[in-house]
């Protein structure tokens, strides 16, 4: 794949809100990549200097100034703004290793059923392996003849490249989840539409998260895990997950918040419920039996 093909074939979407300094670091890394991807920043109604900084310092970057905070749905707005067949996602604190986008695009070129590729993620200046790398690599779903690497039903959004048509076919990130553990539902929906989701450790992304994570993240993740069960998994499974969260809520503040926020959203989840086809449900059950998280 030569440089002109790479420029036309690869886009990067960044969803951001009120983190202009970190976003600037990410953009400098992405703009230095040999692939020279098209970059779209979908700004979730920032109130800091994000938009002014983008106009002043990064004229090559396209900005979508969203009127409100759309959460992970901002990535869908960014993807729709691109006409590239392949779109990688970065967060405002993550970027791709030189050559990684070209490698991922090459794998998508050579595997037409591949809908989304999950990269290997290195964390911080020490480039520590993200624990999810081993989880994905050990996926019990194993390889498939028409996919690279191993099949998975999860990924890290800031380290994934998708086929644009596959993402739109699956509906993209679900608006009900907003942010936090939103990846599993998209992986389910891609697989339900016949697209492959695979992990390839030869593709590398870098993630430099803030030293202090958001205090509400544990509650948001547990809320969205439960909502994902009600949206796609069998009712007995969803009920069991609800009972387990309710039991934890008796002694844990994050679980109480997660349960409260999930129950508020449960009517909407019931209206949007679309159980997985049997072969995808079997795969999800196998992953659950291994107790290996979102792989």
Image: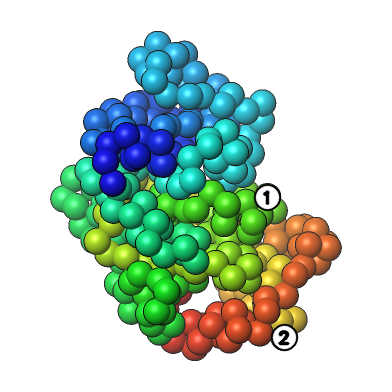
Q: Residue lying furthest left in this view?
A: 126
Above or below 41: residue 227: below
Q: Quadrant of residue 235?
A: bottom right
Q: How many marks?
A: 2
Residue 213's spot in the image, x, y percent? 40, 48
- Kindly identify the residue that appears in the image at 43 percent across and 82 percent down: 141
Q: How is the image coloured?
A: rainbow
Which quadrant would the C terminus be assigned to in this image? bottom left
- Kindly identify the residue that appears in the image at 62 percent across and 51 percent down: 168
Which residue is nearer to you in this view: 32 or 138? 32
| Residue 176 in sight here | yes
Q: Residue lying furthest top in this view?
A: 56
Q: Is residue 263 left or right of residue 183?
A: right
User: Tag 1 or tag 2, which sits nearer the N-term?
Assistant: 1
Cα gap from disc 2 to disc 1, whole angstroms:
24 Å
- Kindly identify the residue that appears in the image at 47 percent across and 63 percent down: 112
Residues packed near mark 1 inside 10 Å, few (<14), some (14 to 19) or many (20 plus): some
Residue position marked by numbered label 2 in the rendering: 236
| Residue 237 in sight here | no
Numbered badge on residue 175:
1
Residue 111's spot in the image, x, y percent? 41, 65
Q: Is residue 225 left or right of residue 12?
A: right
- Kindly identify the residue that appears in the image at 81 percent across and 66 percent down: 270
Q: Quadrant of residue 252?
A: bottom right
Q: Secondary structure at mark 2?
A: helix
Above or below 285: residue 61: above
Q: Secondary structure at mark 1?
A: loop
Residue 55's spot in the image, x, y percent? 44, 14
Numbered badge on residue 14:
none
Residues packed near mark 2 inside 10 Å, few (<14), some (14 to 19) or many (20 plus): few
Residue 40's spot in the image, x, y percent? 47, 31
């Amino acid at each position: 794949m030569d440089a002109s093909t790479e420029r036309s074939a690869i886009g990067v979407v960044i969803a951001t809100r009120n983190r202009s300094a970190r976003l600037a670091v990410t953009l400098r890394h992405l703009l230095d990549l040999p692939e020279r991807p098209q970059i779209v920043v979908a700004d979730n109604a920032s109130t800091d200097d994000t938009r002014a900084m983008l106009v002043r310092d990064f004229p090559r970057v396209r900005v979508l100034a969203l009127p409100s905070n759309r959460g992970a749905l901002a990535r869908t707005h960014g993807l729709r703004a691109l006409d590239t067949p392949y779109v990688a996602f970065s967060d405002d604190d993550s970027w791709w290793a030189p050559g990684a986008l070209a490698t991922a695009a090459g794998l998508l070129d050579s595997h037409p059923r591949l809908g989304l590729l999950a990269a290997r993620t290195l964390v911080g200046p020490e480039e520590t392996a993200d624990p999810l790398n081993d989880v994905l690599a050990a996926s019990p779903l194993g390889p498939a003849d028409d996919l690279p690497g191993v099949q998975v039903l999860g990924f890290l959004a800031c380290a994934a490249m998708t086929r644009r048509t596959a993402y739109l076919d699956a509906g993209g990130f679900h608006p009900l989840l907003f942010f936090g553990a939103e990846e599993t539902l998209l992986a389910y929906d891609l697989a339900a539409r016949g697209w492959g989701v695979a992990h390839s450790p030869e593709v590398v992304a870098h993630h430099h998260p803030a030293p202090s994570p958001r205090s509400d993240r544990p509650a948001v993740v547990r809320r969205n895990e439960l909502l994902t069960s009600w949206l796609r998994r069998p009712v007995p499974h969803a009920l069991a997950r609800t009972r387990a969260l309710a039991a934890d809520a008796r002694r844990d503040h994050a679980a109480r918040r997660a349960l409260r926020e999930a129950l508020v959203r449960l009517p909407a989840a019931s209206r949007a419920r679309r159980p997985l086809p049997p072969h995808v449900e079997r795969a999800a059950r196998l992953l659950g039996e291994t107790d290996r998280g979102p792989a």
